Image (tube, grey):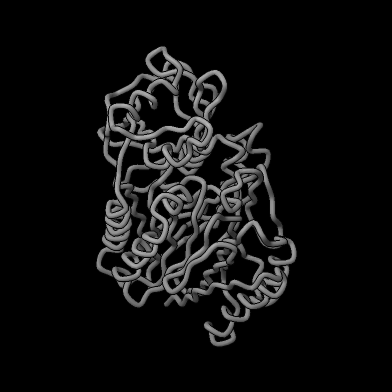
Amino acid sequence: MSRSVTTITSQQDSAQAGAELGRAIREGLNGACADAVIVFASAQHDYQRLLTALVEASGTEVVVGSSSAGEFTNTSRGEGYVSALGLRSESMQFAVGIGRNLTANPIGAARQVVEAFTGLAGRPMPYRSALVMTDALAGHTDALVEEMTIATGGNYRFFGGGAGDDGRFQKTYVFAGTQAMSDAVVALEMLSMQPVGVGVSHGWTPAGPGLRVTEVDGSRLVSLNGAPALQAFEDHAEATSQQLDQENPLPFFLHNILGIESNGSYRLRVPLGIGDDGAVSCAAAIPHGAVVRIMKTTAESAVLAAEQATRSALEALGGREPGAALVFDCVATRLRIGRAFDNELKACADLLGPAGFVGCNTYGQIARAEGQFGGFHNCTAVVCVLPQ
């Protein structure tokens, strides 16, 4: 039997916010300590004070999470908030893994995380998953997820995302216990006697022809089809009667992101800015030689994507009742659709029924599960449903 508590606060004093969340979790568990707590917090907070108070009030040091760019539960959302999920279960076990020096050694960071997993030795529970939160500004998230998959023999489902900082794109943090770290990745291993469901969907479709990535420098897309990357966006703007302001390109980019072709589907990347050389900086790396397309979507498609991700996660439970859920979507989605983001969260809440959820807007989303389009994504809804 598992029990969960979802809670959120707009309290601006960090120590008071942590204490408030911890008390709410203890009260929701009838005074018992949580086995694990997952927390997402705005960049407005002092994370050391927040986490120290949360650990003390909740009664557990098994705390994992990240800074974020919009926080929510099934009942409330906002910017500048802190959201948390407290878990207590007789059929699940939890462990925390930390990987450091992500920029210099992503493979080493992945291995450090996995070394803490208890489900790789002995007689593990049949279902193995992990929440993974990373400093996406450090890069290498695709390599990180791939190496974690290899190191666990493909036996774990991964879900989560890149830490945010309220859309500033300056410095992000991941949390483990009372620690807040940059250039790092954390994971909460979840071993379960029952299935854990993960669903992924984005709702974007191609709006232009395939373009070959002919030069790239990490997350800087230098050229497409041998021409400066900016040229492709300018041509698309003209063909679709849109305005692309090179001094303020983000409004255009939020509605015209890139899709990397892969096995009949698309992994998404959000363009963020334009360099003097016509290169386009993106929220995450794009592989050299890949074929990409400029994509389109609508606010209604974002809602449908959240519904599809939630349905897929629920179906993976095999008919069992959901106990709680974690929901991740891109900060770019929230910025693009504005108040309609409430409709996306309502769609998740309606499908989950009495099971509450906690989540945040991230700088990229992580998903790796059977039957799902795996890896590191932008503008994609990722939903994990935990069994009751």
Where 358 falls versus 299 (above or below)?
below
Residue 32 percent coordinates (x, y): 58, 83
In the image, residue 350 lies at what x, y percent? 30, 71
One can see residue 247 in this view: yes
From the image, which quarter does the C terminus lie in?
Answer: bottom left
Name the residue located 35 percent from the left edge and 30 percent from the top edge: 237
Q: Position of residue 244 (x, y in %)?
A: 42, 32
Given residues 83 and 183, the one toward you in this image is 83
Residue 66 vertical position relative to residue 222 in the rendered view, above or below: below
Which of the 4 image quadrants contains residue 315? bottom left
Question: Quadrant location of residue 229?
Answer: top left
At 29% from the left and 68% from the top, the residue drawn is 351
Residue 375: give x, y in percent of width and height.
42, 40
The answer to whether any part of residue 156 appears in the image is: no
In the rendered image of this protein, does residue 43 appear above or below residue 14?
Answer: above
Above or below, 304 against 289 in this view is below
Please identify the residue farthest to the top as the structure is shown: 226
Left or right, residue 370 beside residue 4: left
Please name the residue shown 59% across and 56% down the image: 66
Query: Is 111 on the left or on the right of 191, as rendered?
Result: right
Q: Residue furthest bottom?
A: 30
- In the rendered image, which quarter contains the N terminus? bottom left
Number of callouts: 0
Of 294 and 56, which appears nearest the observer?
A: 294
